[in-house]
Each structure stands twice: as C-alpha cells, then as structure tokens.
Amino acid sequence: MNWFANSLLAWFDVHGRKDLPWQTDINPYGVWVSEIMLQQTQVATVIQYYQRFMQRFPDVSSLADADIDEVLHLWTGLGYYARGRNLHKAAQRIVSQHNGHLPEDQHQLESLPGIGPSTAGAIRAIAMQQRGVILDGNVKRVLARFHAIDGHYSVAAVSNMLWQRADEHTPTRRVADYTQAIMDLGATLCVRSRPDCDTCPLKKRCQALKEQRVSELPTKKTATPKPTRQARFFVLRLPEGSVLLEQRPQQGIWGGLWNPPERSAETSVETFLDSQGVTDSDVTQVQYKEGFRHTFSHFHLDIEPIYIDLNKAPSMMVQESTQRWVPLARLTENEETIGLSAAALKLLNG
C-alpha cells in the first residue's frame, strides 16, 4: 500500500465519519441511493432525505414498484430531479434484468441510468468488497491539489490524469475504508475555500501546499454568463383552498414535477384565463406579486407570479393527465404524494 493510502487510512481511523445513516447497515442498495443523493449535494442536506426515502423504499423492489410521482415527492427540495427519475428507472431495470440485485460488474453498473464510473466504483468498493476507483468532486479536489494538476476537470486530458492518479492511489486492501476516507478528506479538510492544511494527513507531500498554490487549485472553470429567460406562473386558487397544478413533461427541466401553470412572459391574464375556461364573473381577485429568480445549471429563469382567486372552479374540466386541483393544505402538510419543484414550493407559500 502506498504512502498516500496509508496516510489517509491512518487519519480515517481516528477522524473519519463512520456513523452516517448509510454506514450503519452497509448494502449495495443503500450505498447506491446515498451515492446518487450525494451527487452535487452536501451530506448534511442528504441525511434527512435519505432516511425518509429508505423508510418508504427499503429495497430495490419497493422502489421499482413505486409510482414516479411518489419518488419525486420524496425528492422534492433535494434538486437535480433527474437523479430521482434515474433511480426509479434503474430500479426497474435491476428487477427485470438482474433479479433484483445490483450487478457487481463495473460495466453493468455503468449501464444503469444515472450510474457513472465513479458511482459504480463507490458501490463496488463500499458495498461489494471489490476494488473500485472513485473520482467524485471531493476526490478531484484532493488529487488536483496533491499533484498540483492544472486545468479544469472538463478538459479530457485533465480528467484522464485525475483518473490515472485515482487508480494509482486506490489500494487492494481496506478499499471500502479508503474510499470513504478520501471522500471525507475532501468534504471536511480539503474543502473549496479555506482548507485546513495544518491538520491534513497528506500535507507533507502535497505539491500545491509546497508551491503555495492551494487557493489556485483546482483550476476554476472560466465563467460564462448564463442566459436569462422570463416566464409567468399563474396560481389559481379556489375558496376551499385548492390550487391548480400542471405536470411537466417527463423530459426536460423539472421533468415530471408539478407546478402552477407556467406560460410565456407575454401571456396576458385574460388569455390564460380564457384557456382555462374562466370567465370574468369567476374571478374575485388578481394579484401581481414580486418576481424572483430561479437559477438552473445553464440559465436563469425570472419568474413573475400572478395569483388569481376564483369564486368557483371553472366549468371547463381540467386535463386529469396533466392538470389537477390539489388542496393546498395537503401540499403544505406533506400529504400529497407528488413531486414539486423548488419554485413551486416558493409560489405556493407566497
């Protein structure tokens, strides 16, 4: 075992995290769910979502049999909803093609929706006692600093170099502990800003520390301005407290989630109400509230909320497959098992 792995494991034995919910009863399913949730999300945020998700879906079969709306409901607020949709799809494939067991082969794992090389490596290393190599965001940061690797991860040559280094350092013994250790190091000491180099077990040979370049590495991606889009969201409310929601298409932004109806910024109140079969006599109040911005990975969405109170449901029947009246109380009390976007939650609480 090389110096890097030995030093990391010695630190982990004393300082590593060993009591996280997915570490108490280690199994491939639980590790898989936790690794997907931890993609682009911090541990502190994931814990409660993981516990609630596992209580409802304790095994791959229960997840495969679930309605996607319930899966997304339990994902509401966690963000990056494609992860939840891919978990559901992968569970169904595991049941139908792998007899309900996650495959142990790296390539078979990677063939499942939402599982890339690093996630597959983590599942194999932590839950299957196999040598699996990982390269998540925390590990990239540790390796980029330790080896003073210049260039952003999105550059193929940089990514290949990081994978090479990750493979070189991954031991054949105690691979599960090593995998957890290097993730813990990146999450607790070798963090993005103000890393704690003084207590780092790798400081003696860290090239970035030696060159006084810790703050420069890893290389930041050149920022490009995000485009901005505008949209109007119409929140229709009935006297008994129900609101009209629409389900987004399964593909694309907020896929499969439920929102108050979204229309283009040019859509007038009159045009929207007419499309829903609402007459002037049905309307008791129209309120234009302060807009807000919701940022996606590739663009900003400026949202203009318009709240419309009706004295009765419109005569036009809603499209049950894509629209429904939902009691607001059931949404706020977490009784309605549908997935809501973060923007929808903000609109409904407004």
Image: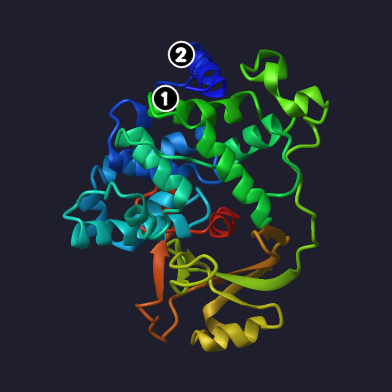
Q: Position of residue 330 (x, y in %)?
A: 38, 54
- 286, 79: nearer the viewer: 79
Q: Residues within 10 Å of mark 2 (few under 14, many from 20)?
A: few
Residue at the image position 65 percent from the left and 59 percent from the top: 297
In this orientation, which residue lies closer to the viewer: 206 or 222?
Answer: 206
Quadrant including the C terminus: bottom right
SS label for mark 2? helix
Residue lying at the far top of the rendered structure: 14
Determine whether, in the image, residue 191 is placed left or right of residue 168.
Answer: right
Residue 252 at x, y = what percent?
A: 52, 71
Residue, far right: 212
Query: What residue is disc 2 on?
Result: 13
> Which residue is found at the position 40% from the left and 64% from the top?
326
Q: Is residue 304 above or below residue 8?
A: below
Q: Which mark is residue 177?
A: 1
Q: Mark 1–mark 2 contact, CB under 8 Å?
A: yes
Q: Residue at x 46, y 26 (%)?
A: 178
Name the residue nearer the viewer: 41 or 293.
41
Q: Is residue 62 visible?
A: yes
The spot of residue 225 in percent (x, y) is 80, 62
